[in-house]
Amino acid sequence: MSDQTMSTAPAIGARRVILVASAGLLAFERLALMGLMYLLTALILVNVVTRYSHFPIYWIDESAVYSVVWLTFIGASAMTRLRLDFAVTMMTERLSARSQQIFKIIATSTVIVFGIGLIVTCMLWMDPIGLAQAGFDAKKFAGQTFNFLYTERTQTLNWPTWVLYLTLPIFAVSITIHGIANLLEDLGLVAKVPPKGFQLSELDGVN
């Protein structure tokens, strides 16, 4: 085996890991989206029936709101991999194919930078290291850092808010992985693979 082959083997392995991780995430996101849509529909129907019957369930409104929040972030991540995210093409569509490809790479790189920035922001905000240093004592952590994330609870569900806010770091990691997978395709380092479980026409993608 030549030195060049040995040097490219780790790079090829890393690309494959990214693509497999992206495909696995997309498959999970598809199931999560379907589940959340069914849940949201059920919550709304129950809310309508109980209000009409004059026996409203007070926590359903908050449940529906958080379902929409998770649905939005998971859907945004999946749309990034499917290249269904919004793009303004008034300028780029008038450029040459080479220039369009360059702008596409720049746009995809910006998504990755945004994802990494969001990961860093979530780490600073949620501060898991500081929480561990406080012995996972939420009150002690809040007293030391004035970060009350782990002591707050939702108004009607009475759930810990940090559990619901986990959608932000999850979204940050998933959009970064999807962005890297898209960038590998844009650079021609890997072949484009049609997403499984999604029926897309040629006109569906706008980015």
Image: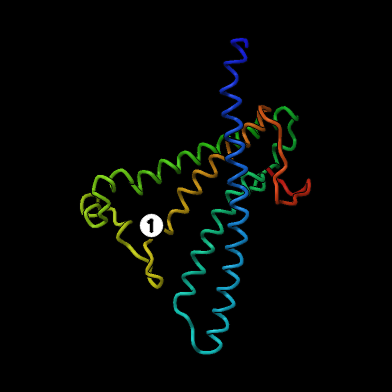
Q: Residue at x 35, y 48 (%)?
A: 125
- The mark total stands at 1
- For the residue pair 172 and 96, the one nearer the viewer reads as 172
**92 w.r.t. 146: above or below:** above
Amino acid type at image mark 1:
Trp
- Disc 1 secondary structure class: helix
Residue receiving disc 1: 162
- For the residue pair 26 and 115, the one nearer the viewer reads as 26
**147 w.r.t. 11: above or below:** below
**181 w.r.t. 136: above or below:** above
Is 83 left or right of 199, judged from the image as shown? left
Q: Quadrant of residue 68?
A: bottom right
The percent position of residue 71, horizontal first and vertical second, equals: 56, 59
Q: Tag 1: Cα neighbours inside 10 Å, few (<14), some, or many (≥20)?
A: some
Q: Residue at x 59, y 10 (%)?
A: 3
Q: Quadrant of residue 191?
A: top right
Q: Residue at x 65, y 35 (%)?
A: 104
> Quadrant location of the C terminus?
top right
Which residue is farthest top?
2
> Quadrant location of the N terminus?
top right
Is 152 left or right of 206, judged from the image as shown? left
The percent position of residue 82, horizontal first and vertical second, equals: 66, 46
Is 32 left or right of 188, judged from the image as shown? left
Which residue is farthest bottom?
54
Q: Residue at x 55, y 73 (%)?
A: 43
Which residue is farthest right?
202
Q: How is the image coloured?
A: rainbow
The percent position of residue 205, horizontal first and vertical second, equals: 71, 46
The percent position of residue 116, horizontal first and vertical second, equals: 47, 38
